[in-house]
Image (cartoon, rainbow, N blue to C red):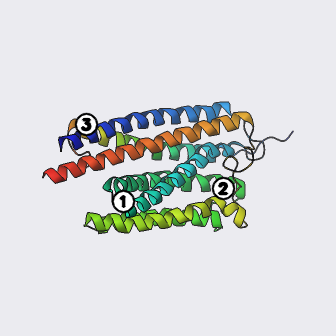
Amino acid sequence: MPSPPANGEYMVAAYVITALVLGGAGIVLLRQAFRVLRGSSGET
Amino acid sequence: MSDSRASARRIVTRGAVLTGAGLAGLAVVYVLALAYTPTEIRQGLAQKIFYLHAPAAWSALLAFSLVGIAGGLYLWLKDERLDRFAVSSAETGLVFSLVMLTTGPIWGKPVWGTWWQWDPRLTLTLFLFFLFVGYLALRGALSDPEERARFSAVVGLLGLILVPFIHLSVYLFRTVHPQPIVLKPSAPSLPDAMLRTLLISFLVYTVLYLGFVTIRYGVRLAREVEVSRA
């Protein structure tokens, strides 16, 4: 039975980029949300 | 006015809860995709990019479709809430597009042997991305709120027209991009573990979309309240 190609580095790159983009956007937005809850408009 | 401020706070609270749930869900998707799903024999580990790429495409196209629908409704009803939602959805759509347009080529390189092909699906998707970059640039260039909402609603509608072409492009044109695996007339063609992980990922990305849009809507509302008080 053939073994799958060794290309895990592409998977790692895609998973890291996705975590950075979605995680980063999520953190930025949560910070904006907390600023609104503290009483300012949330945007600097 | 204090009602609007309280309303903005309620909205961002909901958005924060959804975003927090979505980010936790994303961690679950990572665990499922990396530890639970089998490795595909022909594509190897690169196939696992699928669990992040396809839901990103779904969320981006959902976001841009809703920009167009909200824009069309704005032109009819002139309700500023629709414009506020439309721009929030456009911003969110660009975030998901960024994931789609980076993970796609990273998957394409080991599978197709090239990072990019100027085929209809990929080219139209890139065009849609730039259309909504233009949408936000247009909004930034117009100071009159009514004019800004009206002009950008028209651009949003143009984007909405592109969405079905992008989805159907794999049927309409010769393309290297695979045909839909889940969103198609027949039953999904995937092994159970892969399908389950993919559907959970679709759900998580949808929750993230809702969270991001809700926060941006609430922040924009809070900003408008503050400006009107000044």
Q: Which residue is mark 1?
A: B77
Q: Give me the C-alpha separation between circle 2 and circle 1.
A: 43 Å
Disc 1 residue type (three-letter): Leu
Q: Position of residue A41 (x, y in %)?
A: 23, 46
Is tag 2's residue or tag 1's residue first in the polypeptide sequence?
A: 1
Mark 3 neighbour class, 10 Å CA radius: few under 14, some 14 to 19, many 20 or more: many
- The residue at 33%/35% (across/down) is B13
**Which one is in front, B49 or B166?**
B166
Disc 3 residue type (three-letter): Leu
Extreme-left residue of the structure: B230
In the rendered image, which quarter contains the N terminus of chain B?
top left
Residue B113 relative to residue B22: left or right: right
Say what secondary structure mark 3 lies in.
helix
Q: Does the residue at mark 2 contact the one at mark 1 (Cβ under 8 Å)?
A: no
Say what secondary structure mark 1 lies in.
helix
Residue B175 visible in image: no
Tell me the number on the disc at residue B108: 2
Give the quadrant of residue B78.
Answer: bottom left
**Which one is in front, A11 or A43?**
A43
Q: Exactly how many numbered labels are in the figure?
A: 3
**Which one is in front, B45 or B100?**
B100
Residue A14 visible in image: yes
The chain containing the residue under callout 1 comes to B
Q: Give me the C-alpha separation between circle 1 and circle 3.
A: 30 Å
- The residue at 43%/62% (across/down) is B72
Say what secondary structure mark 2 lies in.
helix
Tell me the number on the disc at residue B85: none
Q: Which residue is mark 3?
A: A37
Q: Looking at the picture, does residue B101 appear above or below residue B186?
A: below
